[in-house]
Amino acid sequence: MGQLFVIEGVDGAGKNTLARRLVSAWERDGLQVARIGFPRYERSVHADLAAEALHGAHGDTAASVHAMALLFALDRREAVDEIRTLLSHNDVVLLDRYVASNAAYTAARLEQPADGEAVEWIRTLEFDRFGVPIPDVHILLDVPVALAAERAAARENADASRARDAYERDGSLQSRTSAVYGVLAASNWMSPWRVVTADVDPDRLAAELSNQPSGEPKVTP
Ligand code: TMP
Ligand code: MG
């Protein structure tokens, strides 16, 4: 059984770059690694509907905090079998965003704290009801919100297809989301959290993570 690691952070934090570097480091060490990014755009109709809503489609869907969270949650529900299969065939499965994204953004939109009703609603919906696998470790890529916002804006300027969505345009939402993430991490919500900054050494982090004792016994040949 492989270990399940999740990278979390606000929009523009640099999760994709960190994920690529971690995967390279593990592969260099001879580990078998799989990676999935959530939302699973172009693979899940729920993910696509959520993105379209955040770009202004589907009437008042984006205005509904709970409707948006349900779309993101349904994308993960559909991925449960895939994640379990990947865990059984790999040493490491790395997820770029996961349930904690829904917890942090939903609480932030509702201006609730990390120990409020929204986070608990997401926890029971996704982990208890949908049975999505619990991560072994969460990694929070904690970068200053202003820097992350600059990066999201720069992407938009460089590539029209990456126009910022409603969440990326909302600096106040990003700040509140960052704050909720910080408390989720400090309380080790659902699993141990590692908080890292943009200058983290990915090789070292990869080594530390893969030596982390897993919740499930590891099958060694
Ligand atoms: P993305 O920027 O990673 O493509 O994700 C789209 C937005 O949706 C981003 O602002 C984070 C947010 N989100 C949630 O609110 N809940 C979720 O479960 C996920 C995966 C993303
Ligand atoms: Mg985004």
Image: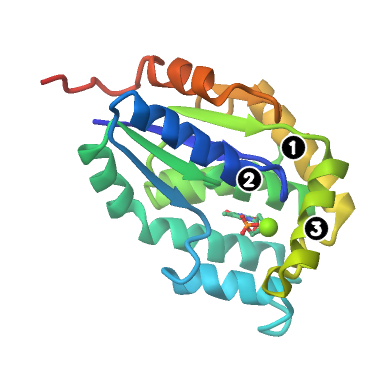
Residue bearing the label numbered 1:
180
Question: In the image, is residue 84 above or below residue 72?
Answer: above
Element type at mark 2: helix
Quarter of the rendered image showing ligand 1: bottom right
Quarter of the image with the N terminus is: top left
- Mark 3 to mark 2: distance in Å? 27 Å
Q: Tell me the amino acid under the disc marked 3.
A: Ala
Tell me which label, 2 or 1, sits earlier in the chain.
2
Residue bearing the label numbered 3:
154
Quarter of the image with the C terminus is: top left
Inspect this view and state whether residue 111 appears: no
Find residue 100 and report its horizontal and vertical position in percent.
58, 42
| Left or right: 102, with 127 as reference point | right
Question: In the image, is residue 174 above or below residue 65?
Answer: above
Element type at mark 1: helix
Picture residue at 84% right of the left edge, 50% below the top: 150
Q: Tell me the amino acid under the disc marked 1.
A: Val
Q: In the rendering, which numbered label is found on residue 103?
A: 2
The quarter of the picture where residue 186 lies is top right
| Left or right: 91, with 155 as reference point | left
Picture residue at 27% right of the left edge, 45% below the top: 86
Choose between 218 and 99: the one closer to the eye.
218
Picture residue at 41% right of the left edge, 50% below the top: 129
Find residue 66 and report its horizontal and vertical position in percent.
65, 62
